Image: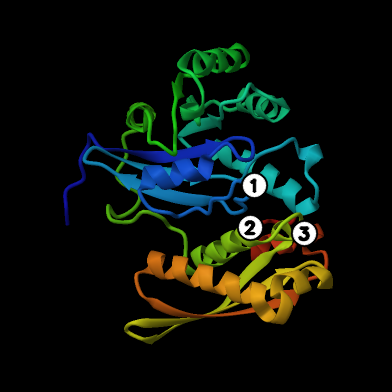
Amino acid sequence: MTEQRKDFKAGFVTLIGRPNVGKSTLLNKLVGEKIAIISPRPQTTRNIIKGVITFEEAQIVFVDTPGLTQVEKAPTIIDKKIIEETLMGIEGVDVVVFVADENEPCSEDYFIMDHLKKVKKPVILTVNKVDKIKQYRALSIIEKYQEHFPFNRSIPISAKKGTNLSILVGEIINYLPFHPPYYPSDLITDQAERVLVAELIREKIFELTHQEVPYSVLVKVDEFKERTQELIYISATIYVEHPSQRGILIGKKGSMIKKIGQLARKEIESRLGCRIYLSLRVGVKKDWRKKIDSLKELGFDIREQK
């Protein structure tokens, strides 16, 4: 058994921000592999995903969260509950990284900052996508945020380019408590393979379909079996809320579902490091986003309120 170092730091760090500011891109860049799906469309992330980075002196467990809006603006009961669960989860972390982008603060940003005022945790502001703007503009945006909240540190970054990410990591480690590592040093995520596969399928649906269809999708992996040492059989069902959406996902003569399957298979093979056989079908779960029980399908541990 290896001796536990007394000078080692470890802790949980949540990435929080409004939709489409680049939290998932930042998580993937920090971890060094794609563990969260990315789309230019807002509110792509639905699950709460943990990514792990282990250094010689510290281990950071990043928690990527769905994009947050005011609870009253949430379109369905599922969206509302996810926001509430995410805000409650901040209490259990050691450091909060508030991710903004190259735009000035808006109502969603103020909503998040107002909530953070109730949380007694170190909060680091990162203004992402600074590769798109001049330095003076980034500093001006940081000042606007600092007027509303007393951040412990404020760092302009570019998750896409990797700008100032080493500075961000160093600042996070400064605020972590002394603690043994929570995970083995070679682990980069605690996300189950079935969840990862479902998310990668959903990402391709975001890439290939439009309007409300991708937001109405629930992907469930039905089978995940190793057929041979070099081949894994995966069967998944893509659920939508309405029969018309099912037709869109299947496409003319099955063209859309075939394209989704081809792109998803390529991505899953790259992530799992082996060949896969992917079987997809499309089903209907009428108005599933309006039913609280659907949160269990998304992996949330929801206790009934009395």
* Residue found at the very far left of the displayed protein: 2
- Determine which quarter of the picture holds residue 242: bottom right
Characterize the local packing of mark 3: few (<14), some (14-19) or many (20 or more) Cα atoms within 10 angstroms: many
Q: Residues within 10 Å of mark 2 (few under 14, many from 20)?
A: many
Picture coordinates of residue 84, whole percent (x, y): 69, 43
State the separation of the CA atoms marked 1 and 3.
Answer: 19 Å
Residue 237 seen by the camera: no
Q: Residue at x 54, y 50 (%)?
A: 38
**To which residue does mark 1 refer?**
41
Residue type of the residue flagged with mark 1: Arg
Residues at circles 1 and 3 in contact by the CB criterion of under 8 Å: no
- To which residue does mark 3 refer? 289
Q: Is residue 168 above or below residue 284?
A: above
- Mark 3 → mark 2, Cα distance in angstroms: 17 Å
The amino acid marked with disc number 3 is Arg
Look at 63% across and 61% down and name the residue there.
208
| Marks 3 and 2, the one that precedes in the sequence | 2
Q: Secondary structure at mark 1?
A: loop
Q: Callout 2, which amino acid?
A: Phe
Q: Which residue is mark 2?
A: 206
Choose the circle earlier in sequence order: 1 or 3: 1
Residue at the extreme bottom of the image, as rendered: 227
**Residue 136 visible in the current orientation:** yes
Q: Residues within 10 Å of mark 1 (few under 14, many from 20)?
A: few
Tell whether label 2 touches label 3 (CB within 8 Å).
Answer: no
* Tag in front: 3 or 2: 2
Q: Secondary structure at mark 2?
A: helix
